[in-house]
């Protein structure tokens, strides 16, 4: 996409949704961290259902550690991979208490050192909890970026680097949420709703078929390859908030 097209793209996404944010429910950076770890290969709705019960009981590292792995599982067993996620969250709580005074660190390396936290999760926390202009690339953003030609790439890191290079600074803070919501509700994987897409005139993959493109580009619709393989696993904060 040309710089003028990219400007038009984000101006329209912003007009549609001036203040985008995560669909995960959270009140503190720690709650967001737990919710994002739980959201791997799970829907935000299912995570919110679980955390609606969990957070009133335990929403600090101390309190979740006190629940223990088995106690935590009771709240999250409706979520896929809950056994592994429970163990990772308990280990994370211990590290936060032992190494970070019970706070979620505002630092990429420290975040990525937490169990179950990879580059994508660290980017979400840095962006949504701490206000850094990072762009986490998930399956939706990978697909949308490739279809639009906004930041083509064969893997998530290539796409992330392309987005950081191509997205104008004034849009970078909210780009993650605009793109993820566009991918989740309009530029969906199987039959993108090009007829209802506000940026269809800018998109080289646009289809006039209400059912979506006749031929789908596997590179644009398939799952992105992750880098480093550590990722296992949504305006917020606020530095003033504990955890
Ligand atoms: S025109 Fe279609 S393929 Fe392009 S961004 Fe919009 S929904 Fe996706």
Image (tube, rainbow, N blue to C red):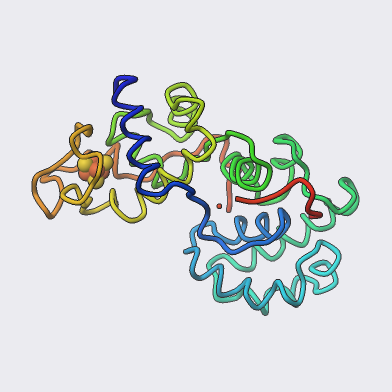
Q: Residue at x 82, y 50 (%)?
A: 103
Locate residue 199, reporting x and y percent.
25, 39
| In the foreground, 155 or 237 | 237
On the question of residue 152 being in view, the answer is: no
When the figure is inspected, residue 161 is found, relative to residue 35, above or below; the finding is: above
Q: Quadrant of the N terminus?
A: top left
The image quadrant of residue 207 is: top left
Locate residue 10, reporting x and y percent.
37, 35
The image quadrant of residue 162 is: top left
Q: Residue at x 55, y 59 (%)?
A: 39
Q: On the rendering, which quadrant does ligand 1 occupy?
A: top left
When the figure is inspected, residue 114 is found, relative to residue 57, above or below; the finding is: above
Q: Quadrant of the C terminus?
A: bottom right
When the figure is inspected, residue 37 is found, relative to residue 231, above or below; the finding is: below
Q: Residue at x 68, y 42 (%)?
A: 130
Locate residue 17, reporting x and y percent.
40, 49
Locate residue 20, reporting x and y percent.
48, 49
192 with respect to 112 (left or right): left
């Amino acid at each position: 996409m040309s710089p003028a097209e990219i400007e038009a793209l984000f101006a329209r996404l912003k007009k549609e949704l001036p203040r985008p944010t995560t669909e995960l429910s959270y009140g503190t950076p720690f709650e967001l961290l737990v919710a994002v770890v739980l959201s791997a290969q799970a829907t935000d709705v299912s995570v919110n259902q679980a955390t609606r019960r969990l957070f009133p009981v335990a929403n600090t590292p101390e309190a979740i550690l006190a629940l223990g792995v088995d106690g935590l599982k009771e709240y999250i067993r409706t979520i896929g991979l809950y056994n592994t996620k429970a163990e990772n969250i308990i280990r994370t709580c211990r590290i936060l208490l032992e190494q970070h005074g019970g706070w979620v660190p505002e630092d990429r390396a420290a975040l990525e050192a937490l169990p179950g936290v990879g580059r994508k999760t660290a980017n979400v926390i840095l962006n949504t909890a701490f206000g850094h202009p990072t762009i986490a690339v998930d399956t939706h953003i990978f697909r949308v970026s490739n279809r639009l030609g906004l930041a083509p790439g064969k893997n998530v890191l290539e796409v992330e680097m392309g987005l950081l290079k191509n997205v104008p600074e004034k849009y970078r803070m909210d780009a993650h949420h605009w793109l993820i919501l566009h991918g989740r509700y309009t530029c969906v994987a199987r039959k993108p709703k090009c007829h209802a897409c506000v940026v269809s005139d800018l998109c080289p993959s646009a289809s006039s078929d209400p059912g979506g493109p006749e031929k789908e580009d596997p590179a644009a619709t398939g799952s992105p390859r992750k880098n480093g393989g550590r990722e296992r696993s949504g305006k917020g904060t606020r530095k003033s908030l504990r955890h």
